[in-house]
Amino acid sequence: MSEKTSVADRAVAAGFAAGWTLVPYLPQKPTAAAFRLAADRVWRKRGKSVRRLESNLSRVTGLPVGGAELGELTRQGMRSYFRYFHEIFRLPKMDRAEVVRRTHVTGAEHVHDNVAAGRGVVLALPHMGNWDQAGAWLVGVGHPFTTVAERLKPESLFRRYVAFREGLGMEVLPLTGGDGHNFGTLATRVRRGGVVCLPAERDLTKSGVEVRFFGATTKVPAGPPLLAVQTGCALLPAIVYFDGDDWGIDIHPEVPVPAEGTRQEKVASVAQGLADVFEKGIAQHPEDWHMLQRLWLDDLTPVKAATEAAANEER
């Protein structure tokens, strides 16, 4: 890691540490306003992440890049993204009963009924709204769960994030750098009738499953559909969004596993079914979809080609 990157990482880690230390003890309205102002400043600068969010939202909505309507939607998207961070800093000190009371859920019976019957559940979510708050709600209604977290840099930030989520009642497995048996652990949890929650619209392992998503091809993680195919658990898509000052969660019926076909064919079918539900949910709440990275394969191709060309020049 370069010195520049290392300094930047340390600065980010220090900012998060300050957020969890200070924000819970400051008045809610002024700090919320400060985070909105910060989001607006970032949006006006139109850096790489903002431009990528705008491009992704253009795919979702069909609005032209550079237009006023898409620009305003992107601004709302950045405000939503910064609201997430403001809320996670406050969440550890929030009353759990208040979190449950202010979370408006449809389809909760899909979780309750399966767990009551002794059947494991995998809740699969896109990166929307406040997924950590959704996790706090799930724990608050009696369903502690296991999840997998991307290994952030520096290590101190990753450990702090893990501690934050464990403090909410989650079991957190690292995506990389752990014992290498995440899938086996998750399978054990659901086979025992437990609950697993996984982000599921962006593949971070390079072994994802291709799906059609808003008219183009992307890859989604193989884990959630593979768990459904191999363990028989209920795979439930969940859409998480902001509902005024409160929160909304729409938990959809389980994605069915085909009775016929190879394991690969079944996983592909389940992955596409999951992507179809995500597509509808994101289209309903595009401002709350926090996708500031490249997602579709045709967006990744120029980057891959440039990387390979640079590598060839160095040889």
Image: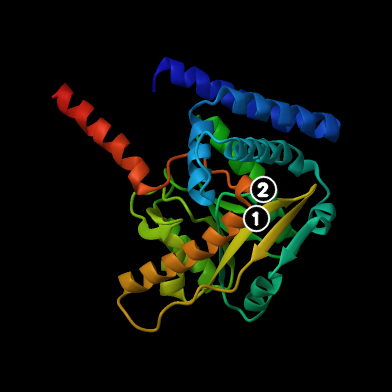
Q: Is residue 264 visible?
A: yes
Seen in the picture, residue 21 relative to 77 is either above or below; the reply is above
Which image quadrant for residue 239?
bottom right
- Residue 173 seen in this snapshot: no
Residue 224, given in percent of the width and then of the height, sits at: 47, 63
Mark 2 lies on residue: 130
* Residue at x-position 34% and y-position 49%: 206
Question: Picture coordinates of residue 270 (x, y %)?
Answer: 43, 70
Quadrant containing the N terminus in the rendered view = top left
Residue with the mark numbered 1: 240
Residue toward you, 229 or 301: 301
- The structure residue drawn at horizontal position 39% and vertical position 71%, both measured from the top left corner, is 269
On the picture, is 299 further left or further right than 55? left
Q: What's the amino acid at mark 2? A: Asn
- Measuring from the top left, give residue 73's x and y in whole percent: 62, 41
Question: Contact (CB < 8 A) between labels 1 and 2?
Answer: yes
Please identify the residue farthest to the left as the structure is shown.
315
Secondary structure of the residue carrying tag 1 is: strand
Mark 2 closeness class: few <14, some 14–19, many ≥20 residues within 10 Å: many
Query: How crowded is the residue under tag 1: few (<14 C-alpha within 10 Å), some, or many (20+)?
Result: many
Q: Residue at x 65, y 48 (%)?
A: 129
User: Which residue occupies the foreground of this view, 22 or 108?
Assistant: 108
Q: Say which label, 1 or 2, has the lower sequence index.
A: 2
Asked if residue 190 is positioned above or below residue 15 in the image, the reply reads below
Q: Can you tell which quarter of the image residue 13 is in?
A: top right
Percent from the top left, x then y, of residue 261? 31, 79
Residue farthest top in this picture: 3
